[in-house]
Amino acid sequence: MMVEAKLKKKQKTQEWPGGEEEDYVRRAIAAWFRSGGPGQPMPANSSSVQDHDGKFYVELHNGNGTLAVYRIRTDGILKRLKRWPDVDLN
């Protein structure tokens, strides 16, 4: 029974930090361009905010695939992820 108790992990859900989804996408695109040099690929207009396991993410992608994923923290700050969730955020 102790093993069962340890295996049950309480899922924490994040409340929406407020603001418009488009604002988070705009901020993520700006951060994307600040982080790279010239010739960096352009994110698509269909980049969007996604909800996964109770947390919110901004996925930047283009025709070639995912460019970057930013987590929206509870205080509204974006944090770029080096490794994003294994599931498709679309």
Image (tube, rainbow, N blue to C red):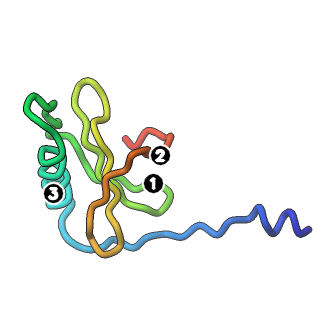
How far apart in space, not on screen, are marks 3 and 2 (Cα)?
Answer: 21 Å
User: Which residue position is annotated with label 2?
Assistant: 85
User: Which residue appears at 32% of the width and 62% of the height?
Assistant: 72
Corner quadrant of residue 88 = top left
How far apart in space, not on screen, are marks 1 and 2 (Cα)?
Answer: 8 Å
- Residue 15 in the image: x percent, y percent? 39, 73
Q: Looking at numbered disc 2 in the image, what kind of residue is underneath it?
A: Pro
Q: Looking at numbered disc 1 in the image, what kind of residue is underneath it?
A: His
Q: Of tags 3 and 1, which is closer to the observer? A: 3
Do the residues bearing badges 1 and 2 touch, measured as CB atoms within 8 Å? yes
**Quadrant location of the N terminus in the rendered image:** bottom right
- Residue 23 in the image: x percent, y percent? 14, 61
**SS class of the residue under badge 2?**
loop
Corner quadrant of residue 12 = bottom right
Instruction: Judge from the rendering whether residue 57 lies leftward or rightward of residue 21; answer left or right.
Output: right
- Residue 13 in the image: x percent, y percent? 49, 69
User: Which residue appears at 43% of the width and 44% of the height?
Assistant: 83
Do the residues bearing badges 3 and 1 touch, measured as CB atoms within 8 Å? no
In the rendered structure, find residue 27 and report the number of the disc placed on it: 3
Q: Looking at numbered disc 3 in the image, what kind of residue is underneath it?
A: Arg
User: Which residue position is annotated with label 1?
Assistant: 52
Q: Residues within 10 Å of mark 1 (few under 14, many from 20)?
A: some
**SS class of the residue under badge 3?**
helix
**Quadrant location of the C terminus in the rendered image:** top left
Instruction: Judge from the rendering whether residue 83 lies leftward or rightward of residue 66; answer left or right.
Output: right
